[in-house]
Image: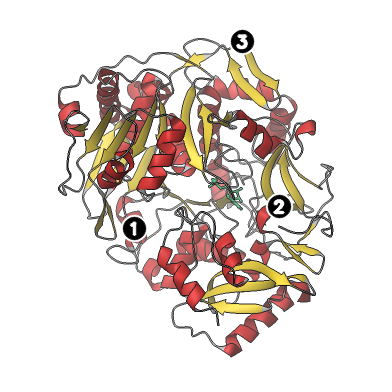
C-alpha cells in the first residue's frame, strides 16, 4: 500500500498504445449490432432509462409471474424484478426444448481423450433426474449444496439441478485443498456435497473424494450426504450411510421434474473469492438479475449464433465458468464445448487440436494461458487448422498488448475480433467490454462499458477525473447481475464495496484505471498493487506490459520494495521465452527498454529471472507473495490459493 500521507491522488499511466483494430466489415455485416450509432443509442437508453432497457431484455426470458418493479434500490441493497418469478434451470433448458431438443448443449472432451455429447433433450433429462435425487435426499429450497467436481458435464448438471429445486450451489474449484473445503463448508452451512472419485489433470488423478473425506473428518455432522461421481475409477472408500454413487442414485430417478417457480431474488449460488486479506468472501448471487445479466452479455458480447461451437476455457469453479460456461450460454440455447484437462496434455498443442477437431468458432480464455502458449512456441498453433474460429475473448487480468497481438495473429489469423472483457466475481457478468461488431479495439484495453454500466474513474474524494488521468474505477449505478451481499456478513459487504464512495452510492471495484480520450478504460491493476515510486503512483500492469513487449520475455510480474530514497523501488520478476537465456546483459537491456517505453521513473531497479511466477489457481499472479520475496521478508499470509507451492521456495532461494 502506498503511504496515504504522501501519495498523490492519481495513478500515473503513460504506456502508449496506438494500434486500433476496427471490427472486420464481414463480421459487422452479420452482427446483431453492427453500427456504432445503434450501439450508442441503445447504450444511452440503458443508462438513462435502465428500467426500460432491462425490462425489454428480461422479456426474452421465461417468467412464471410478472415483476411489478424493475429495480428497487435501497443503496447498497438492490432488488431486481421485484415480485417476478422464474426458474433459472427452466430458462436454460425447458425453454429451448421445442426448437433445440436435438441440438448439442454440451460437447465435452476428457483429458484422456474420451468424450460425450449431450443434446438439450438429454441435458434436460439428466438435470431432472439429479434434481429428483437431491430432493429425495431432503434438499429443500435455500439449502446450500457444495459441488466439488472435475470439469465434466455432470458439474453443469449438478448446478442446474440445484437451480431447478431452488437449492443454493457453492462450487469449489477442484484444485482447492481439504482445508479450503472445510472453511467453505463451515461458512456456507452446506449440508450436502457432490463430488467425484477424481478428475484428470496432466495424466494424474486429482483426489477429490479423498479431499472431501479429509474435510469431513472432524466435521460436526452437519453434512448429511455425499454423492460421488465415478470419473477416474480409482479406489475410494465410501462411508456407509453418508456416501452414495451418482450412477446408483440417478439410475432409478425419474427424468421428469416439474420446474417450480422461485422469486427473482431467490439465492442462486454462493461463490467464494479471496480478498487480499482475511478469509474468503462468499459472494452471493440471486436468480432473475444474474440470469438476465449473463444471458444478455453472452448474446451481445459473443454475438452468439445457433451454429456456434462456443468454448470458454474456464473451470466451473470460477465465476467465468458459472456465467460463461453454464448460465449465459445455455440461457441462449448455445452449444457449449468443455474440456476437462490441462492445455499441455498430452502435448502443448492440445487446445489447437481441440479447436481443429471440434470446429470451435468462439474461444474465450485468460491472458495467463496466452502467455504460457507464447512461451511454449508458435509451432504448436501453427500446426493446426484454426480457420473455424470467428471470435476470441479474454478475461481475468489486463492483457499485455503483445500477448493480445500474438492471440490476434497466431490464433485469430488476424481476422477474429478480440473481446477483452473486464468484470469480477462480484459483478456476475461483463461490465467493460467491446461489442465485436461495433467497437474498434486497441490491444490492452477492455474498451467501453457494457449496457447499463455507468463506470467512471474517480479520485480519492470520488470526483470524476479527466481523460488519461489515473484513478479508482467505480460503478455509479446498480446493475442486474451485481452481487447482493457477502454470505452471512452484510457488514463486510458494505465495508468492502461501499465504504470508499458509499455516500455517493458508488460501487468500488478495487481496481485502478484510466480512461483515454476515446473513453476507453485501461485497467492498471488492483489498487493494492499500485506502486509509489518517488511520489508517482504507477500501475504494475503497465510496466509488465512493457517488459512482455520485449522479444526475450514471456511473462513478468512487477512489485515494489522499500527504498529509502524513492519510497518504493521497482522489482520485476521475469520469465524468458524458450530459447532465451537470462543474463546480466539481458537484465540491463530490459531496464533500458522499460525506461524507453514508459519513462525513467518506471525503470526497474532490479530484474529477477525465474522459471515460473506464483499464481492463484485461476491464473492471477500473486504479487503479494512476490512483494514479500522482493523485500526479503518471510512470506506470511494465506498461500492456500497458490497453484504450485514449490515456486515460492525457488524464488526465495534465487534471492542473491
Ligand atoms: C481483473 C474474473 C483487466 C480485475 C471475471 C478484476 C481484469 C479482477 C480483466 C476480478 C480484464 C478481470 N482486464 N483486468 N479484462 N478481467 N480483471 O473476481 O483486477 O476472478 O477486479 O473475476 O480481475 O477477478 P475475478
First in sequence: mark 2 or mark 3?
3
Q: Secondary structure at mark 2?
A: strand
Looking at the rendered structure, which numbered label has been put on residue 512? 2
* Residue displayed at 44% across by 42% down: 321
Side (left or right) of 454 relative to 462: left
Dot 3 and dot 1 residues touching (CB under 8 Å): no
Q: Secondary structure at mark 1?
A: loop
Q: Which of label 2 and label 1 is nearer to you?
A: 2
Looking at the rendered structure, which numbered label has been put on residue 342? 1
Mark 2 Cα shell of 10 Å, populated few (<14), some (14-19), many (≥20): many
Q: Can you tell me whether the CB of the residue at mark 1 lies under 8 Å from the nearest atom of ligand 1? A: no
Q: Could you say which quadrant of the image residue 589 lies in?
A: bottom right
CA distance for labels 2 and 3: 38 Å
Foreground of the two, 606 or 213: 213
Q: How is the image coloured?
A: secondary structure
Q: Secondary structure at mark 3?
A: loop
* Residue displayed at 54% across by 64% down: 635
Amino acid at each position: 500500500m502506498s503511504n496515504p500521507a504522501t501519495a498523490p491522488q492519481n495513478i500515473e499511466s503513460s504506456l502508449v498504445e496506438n494500434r486500433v483494430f476496427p471490427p472486420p466489415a464481414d463480421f459487422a455485416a452479420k452482427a446483431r449490432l453492427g453500427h456504432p450509432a445503434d450501439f450508442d443509442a441503445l447504450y444511452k437508453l440503458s443508462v438513462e432509462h435502465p428500467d426500460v432497457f432491462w425490462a425489454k431484455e428480461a422479456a426474452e426470458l421465461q417468467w412464471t409471474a410478472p415483476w411489478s418493479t424493475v429495480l428497487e434500490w435501497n443503496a447498497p441493497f438492490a432488488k431486481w424484478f421485484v415480485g417476478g418469478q422464474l426458474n433459472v434451470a427452466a430458462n436454460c433448458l425447458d425453454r429451448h426444448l421445442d426448437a433445440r431438443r436435438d441440438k448439442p448443449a454440451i460437447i465435452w472432451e476428457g483429458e484422456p481423450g474420451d468424450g460425450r455429447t449431450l443434446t438439450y433433450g438429454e441435458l434436460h433429462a439428466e438435470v431432472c433426474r439429479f434434481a429428483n435425487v437431491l430432493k429425495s435426499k431432503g434438499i429443500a429450497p435455500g439449502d446450500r449444496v457444495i459441488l466439488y467436481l472435475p470439469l465434466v458435464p455432470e458439474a453443469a448438471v449438478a448446478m442446474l439441478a440445484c437451480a431447478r429445486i431452488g437449492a443454493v450451489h457453492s462450487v469449489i474449484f477442484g484444485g482447492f485443498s481439504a482445508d479450503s473445503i472445510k472453511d467453505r463448508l463451515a461458512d456456507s452451512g452446506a449440508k450436502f456435497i457432490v463430488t467425484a472419485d477424481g478428475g484428470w489433470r496432466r495424466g494424474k488423478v486429482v483426489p477429490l473424494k479423498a479431499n472431501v473425506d479429509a474435510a469431513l473428518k472432524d466435521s460436526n455432522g452437519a453434512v448429511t450426504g455425499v454423492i460421488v461421481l465415478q470419473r477416474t475409477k480409482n479406489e475410494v472408500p465410501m462411508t456407509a450411510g453418508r456416501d452414495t454413487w451418482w450412477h446408483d442414485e440417478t439410475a432409478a430417478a425419474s427424468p421428469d421434474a416439474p420446474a417450480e417457480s422461485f422469486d427473482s431474488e431467490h439465492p442462486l449460488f454462493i461463490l467464494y473469492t479471496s480478498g487480499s486479506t482475511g478469509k474468503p468472501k462468499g459472494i452471493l448471487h440471486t436468480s432473475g438479475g444474474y440470469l438476465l445479466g449473463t444471458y444478455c452479455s453472452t448474446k451481445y458480447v459473443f454475438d452468439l449464433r445457433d451454429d456456434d461451437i462456443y468454448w470458454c476455457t474456464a473451470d466451473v469453479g470460477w465465476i467465468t465458468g458459472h456465467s460463461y460456461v453454464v448460465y449465459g450460454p445455455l440461457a441462449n440455447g448455445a452449444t457449449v464445448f468443455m474440456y476437462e484437462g490441462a492445455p499441455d496434455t498430452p502435448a502443448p498443442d492440445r487446445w489447437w487440436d481441440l479447436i481443429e477437431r471440434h470446429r470451435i468458432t468462439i474461444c474465450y480464455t485468460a491472458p495467463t494461458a496466452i502467455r504460457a502458449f507464447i512461451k511454449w512456441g508458435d509451432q504448436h498453433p501453427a500446426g493446426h487448422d484454426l480457420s473455424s474460429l470467428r471470435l476470441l475473448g479474454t478475461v481475468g487480468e489486463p492483457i499485455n498488448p503483445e500477448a493480445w497481438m500474438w492471440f490476434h495473429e497466431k490464433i485469430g489469423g488476424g481476422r477474429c475480433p478480440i473481446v477483452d472483457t473486464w468484470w469480477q466475481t462480484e459483478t456476475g457478468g461483463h461490465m467493460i467490454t467491446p461489442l465485436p461488431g461495433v467497437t474498434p479495439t486497441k490491444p490492452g484495453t477492455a474498451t467501453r462499458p457494457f449496457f447499463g454500466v455507468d463506470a467512471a474513474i474517480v479520485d480519492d474524494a470520488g470526483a470524476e477525473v479527466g481523460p488519461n488521468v489515473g484513478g479508482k474505477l467505480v460503478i455509479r449505478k446498480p446493475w442486474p447481475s451485481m452481487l447482493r451481499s457477502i454470505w452471512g456478513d452484510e457488514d463486510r459487504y458494505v465495508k468492502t464495496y461501499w465504504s470508499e464512495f458509499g455516500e455517493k452510492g458508488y460501487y468500488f471495484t478495487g481496481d485502478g484505471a484510466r480512461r483515454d480520450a476515446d473513453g476507453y478504460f485501461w485497467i492498471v491493476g488492483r489498487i493494492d498493487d499500485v506502486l509509489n515510486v518517488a511520489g508517482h503512483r504507477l500501475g504494475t500492469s503497465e510496466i509488465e506490459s512493457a517488459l512482455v513487449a520485449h522479444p526475450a520475455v514471456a511473462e513478468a510480474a512487477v512489485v515494489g520494495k522499500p527504498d529509502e530514497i524513492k519510497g518504493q523501488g521497482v522489482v520485476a520478476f521475469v520469465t524468458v521465452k524458450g530459447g532465451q537465456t537470462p543474463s546480466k546483459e539481458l537484465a540491463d537491456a530490459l531496464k533500458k527498454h522499460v525506461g524507453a517505453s514508459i519513462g525513467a521513473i518506471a525503470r526497474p531497479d532490479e530484474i529477477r529471472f525465474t522459471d515460473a511466477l506464483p499464481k492463484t489457481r485461476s491464473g492471477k499472479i500473486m504479487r503479494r507473495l512476490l512483494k514479500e520475496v522482493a523485500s526479503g521478508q518471510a512470506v506470511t499470509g494465506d498461500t492456500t490459493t497458490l497453484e504450485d507451492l514449490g515456486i515460492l521456495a525457488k524464488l526465495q532461494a534465487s534471492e542473491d
